[in-house]
Image (cartoon, rainbow, N blue to C red):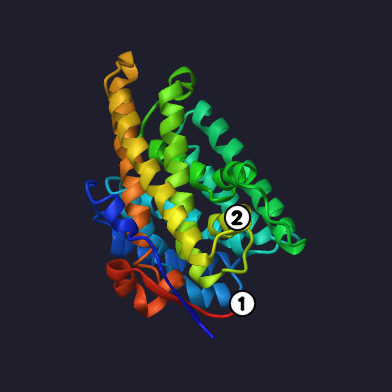
Amino acid sequence: MSTRIKLPLLVSFCQSLELRTNRHCRAVADDCANWVQRNRFLGEDELRALPGLQLGLFASLSYPTCDRTQLQNITYLLVVLGHFVHASPIRNNTAADSAFDQLWACLIRSTSAVWQQRFQRHYQAFRGARALSATDNEQLVIPDLESYVALRRDSSGVKILLDLIEYSAGLRIPDRIYAAPMLQQLRTDVCNIISWSTDIASYVRQHSDRHNLVVVLMAQRRLTAQGAVTAAGRLVKETIANFFANEASLLAQSFGHADADVRRYAQGLRDCIVGSTHWLYETDWFFGENAEDVRELGWVFLSPN
């Protein structure tokens, strides 16, 4: 028998953020389909699911001001990251690695050595975290909340998404400013907001996945599915409020010659929050044809595991 629960209305949490769409959205969606056919690293199931994933739209909502070439590269990278999210860690991913290497050759043409080191660090952490989460699932391990939250910031790939803000806007943020405590906290806020919002949406489709905030809360706090989803939503809402407070503190500071880039980066963080949240209801991956009803009302049915 199916269980009915009500999800938090995630879009309402970020309604004060402006949602913008990149003008190259439609063209890049077509470009992406052609690129995937040329590179041939997706399995048949992935190929069938790709159009409904709307990854070009995700990129367009999250990076609304970049040019077509930048949006292409970001969208192609999302396809690769999505593949590694769903692929078995023991599978031969030589073709996907080759596709990533092609994209990396494009990214390094317009980015600094400092940015490239950060990106590679976050990319390797992502791959490692995906392998660890897969092992936990195989061994039926549910991590404690603190361990899960730290791991999820890497396994979600959000740190990579935030690196792409600098690439998409041509920013140059020195290490000493990138490491500023308030900027670090803002990135942590955004990682948690996007990761946890995705967990809430994906619980409906994959509620047997132990690498999910809702499942972790159910286990650690002995909550029902509804109680855990509500608690997860409360965490997202509180973290968005923290983001706004931390953003105000950041923008009250001066960063010298990098001040304009820091402010554009902060706007990029906003774009990633609101773009990724709206995308949850545009892709058919989570809610299928019921997405609009879920966006407005929150009610979903959980099928048996």
Q: Does 226 sit above or below residue 127?
A: below
Please state the horizontal and vertical placement of residue 108, each as a whole percent of the image.
50, 37
Image point (40%, 54%), residue name: 72
Q: Hey, which quadrant is residue 209 in on the image?
A: bottom right
SS state under label 1: loop
Q: Position of residue 286 (x, y in %)?
A: 45, 70
Does residue 86 lie above or below 192 as drawn? Answer: below
Q: Residue furthest front?
A: 222
Position of the N terminus by quadrant: bottom right
Name the residue type under label 1. Asn
The kind of secondary structure element at disc 2 is: helix
Residue 189 visible here = yes
Q: Residues within 10 Å of mark 2 (few under 14, many from 20)?
A: many
Horizontal side, residue 304 vs residue 194: left or right: right
- Circles 1 and 2: CB atoms closer than 8 Å: no
Position in image of residue 160 (x %, y %): 50, 43
Location of the C terminus (image quadrant): bottom right
- 113 left or right of 182? right
Labelled disc at residue 165: none
Asked if residue 19 is positioned above or below residue 165 in the image, the reply reads: below
Identify which residue is drawn at 48% across, 56% down. Answer: 78
| Residue at the image position 58 percent from the left and 68 percent from the top | 40
Amino acid identity at mark 2: Val
Residues at marks 1 and 2, CA–CA distance in whole angstroms? 16 Å
Q: Position of residue 117 (x, y in %)?
A: 57, 31
Q: Mark 1 or mark 2: name the one nearer the start of the chain.
A: 2
**Of residues 295 and 227, the one drawn nearer to the viewer in this rendering:** 227
Looking at the image, can residue 110 be seen? no
Name the residue furthest bottom: 1
**Residue tagged 2:** 216
Q: Nearer the viewer, residue 171 or 266?
A: 266
Residue pointed to by mark 1: 305
